[in-house]
Amino acid sequence: MKQANTINIKNRKAKFQYEFLDKYVAGIKLAGTEIKAIRQGKASIAESFCEFQDGELYVINMHVEEYSHATHFNHNPKSERKLLLQKRELRKLEKEVKNGGLTIIPLRLFINDRGLAKMQISLAKGKKLYDKRETIKDRDNKRKLDRIKKEYN
């Protein structure tokens, strides 16, 4: 069953608050009703982050709404969900987080061409206030340049 890959849930605040160093694509361990809710686009990763527990990586605070057609076997909307990565990637990430003071942020939740839920995560460093100001300034300058270009076309 091939379906159009229309699910692409993004963490829009992450680009503003963090500087990305490395990006990875991880699978997610989900319950049956969770994947159905994600396929309907009823998920949010805006406030979520990743954390190591016993050598395994979990996404915390990811919100997946309850599936509307489920019975009493529905899932918990805010439960921790395990991310599936290769062992060497997990070891590398865990070492970076412990030693470097970095964090792991979910960037994007999507359904791949095989119909599986995947999450793009990034090893990130938090931006300081002056870096955020610089980002705002760059965005405003780009917007002004685009307006000027549009007037002359």
Image (spheres, rainbow, N blue to C red):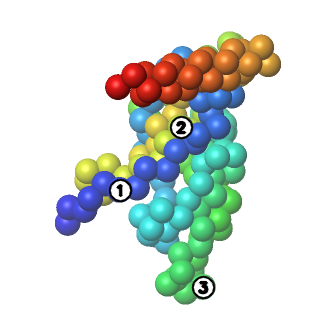
- Closer to us: 116 or 89: 116
Q: Secondary structure at mark 1?
A: loop
Name the quadrant of the C terminus: top left
Q: Amino acid at mark 1?
A: Thr
Farthest residue to the front: give it: 152
Q: Residue at x 67, y 23 (%)?
A: 136
- Mark linked to residue 6: 1
Q: Check whether the beta carbons of the residues at disc 3 and disc 2 lie within 8 A of each other.
A: no
Q: Amino acid at mark 3?
A: His
- Closer to us: 89 or 112: 112
**Residue beneath disc 2:** 107
Q: Residue at x 53, y 64 (%)?
A: 42
Q: Is residue 117 left or right of residue 81?
A: left
Quarter where residue 49 is shown: top right
Q: Amino acid at mark 2?
A: Leu
How far from the left and from the top, in percent, is residue 105?
61, 34
How far from the left and from the top, in percent, is residue 52?
65, 35
- Closer to us: 56 or 13: 13
Tell me which numbered mark, 1 or 2, is placed earlier along the sequence. Answer: 1
Q: Check whether the beta carbons of the residues at disc 1 and disc 2 lie within 8 A of each other.
A: no
Count residues near mark 2 (Cα–Cα under 10 Å), then give few for <14, some for 14-19, many for 20+.
Answer: many
- Closer to us: 15 or 54: 15
